[in-house]
Image: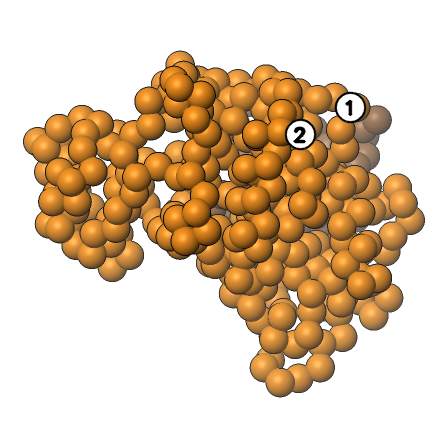
Amino acid sequence: MSQTLVAAECLECDAEVPWENDTRVGEILECPDCRVEFEVESVEPPKIVLAPEVEEDWGE
Amino acid sequence: MSSATARFGVLASRVRFEEKSILATLDKRGIVCEQIDPRSLSVRAGTAWDGPGTVLNREVGHYRALYAASALESVGVTVLNSAAATAVCGDKWQTSAALVAEGLPTPDTGLALTPDAALAALEEIGYPAVVKPLVGSWGRLVTRVTDPAMASAVLEHLAALPSPQSHIVYVQREVPKADRDIRVLVVDGRAVGATYRSSKEWRTNVARGAVSERCPLDPDLTTLAVAAAGKLGARIAGVDLLQDPDGRLTVLEVNDRVEFRGLQETHGTDIDVAGAIVDLLIKETRA
């Protein structure tokens, strides 16, 4: 069961972006306030960067 | 960047529900796994690869997935799905041509080599029809055209796009169907589960808000989905089927890097998609 441990700070609006104990590098987190998406660049220490834009060939 | 101890790798630049489930399953089973980000991957032809011998390809971008698979296979890595399967499944025309060649039912489809030629192809196929990009997913830029005037406008827009690939036009006769399609998830030649995907709009992609409901697997569904995945070389596949009002099933797509969140959540603990995929990874490594 995942559990919120810490929060990263939104790079756009400074709101807290929830961070679970099973958060992984490469995961996409969304700011609950401004809805900007972030990519987890590092778990230890927690670091987020703006998520890349969806590209034309993305999918399944 | 490679770990000498990991036998398995999961190639992904974006960790979604699916990748997270697979990585968590590997962790739970105590299997050492290397998460490989293709954005920092390079492979030199003809050299030894010191990374994992088996790699699960979960890259979200089709071209990066395709070339990563090809590059890794060139240095002896087993990639699931293979580069050949990704090449066929990731391109709608290649998929249609392969399904027809294998004698599997699929909607009436044409390929026009210019937007101008597409108008004639649409006349031949008949309206309503659907114009789709060759590569892409989630129903993006898929356009339903109901008459020549609408088709001309859509094709004019395609002609104005900069990519040469956009000028190769894939057209398909629309299959009359209920407001839902069927997704069958196939792993290693076995249908793991299926869902109906329903939508208020005509595109039934979950990414567009379609709702998943459990669909009972019956022999017709299972046989067709397993055959489609197998014939296209996909060991892990999301096979999309349509059922016309007379009950006939046709294969629309075979997705080689399948998203399965909707299907897994619909089935709860009755199926374990990530577990089935990890079982296949282990089996491939032993083979």
Q: Please, what is the three-letter code of the amino acid marked with disc 2?
A: Gly
Return the residue at label 2.
Answer: B193
Q: Residue at x 28, y 56 (%)?
A: B165
| Residue B109 at x, y percent in the picture | 29, 43
Return the residue at label 1.
Answer: B270
Dot 2 or dot 1: first in sequence order is 2
Asked if B244 appears above or below B71 in the picture, the reply is above
Find residue B125 and report its image quarter.
Answer: top left
Q: CA distance from mark 2 to mark 1?
A: 9 Å
Q: Are marks 2 and 1 in contact (CB under 8 Å)?
A: yes
Q: Residue at x 80, y 47 (%)?
A: B279
- Colour in which chain B is shown? orange
Q: Residue at x 68, y 74 (%)?
A: B76
| Residue B169 at x, y percent in the picture | 24, 49
The foreground one among A6 and B189 is B189
Residue found at the far left of this picture: B149
* Chain letter for mark 2: B
Find residue B56 and report its image quarter.
Answer: bottom right
For the C terminus of chain B, which image quadrant? bottom right
Q: Which mark, residue B110? A: none
For the N terminus of chain B, which image quadrant? bottom right
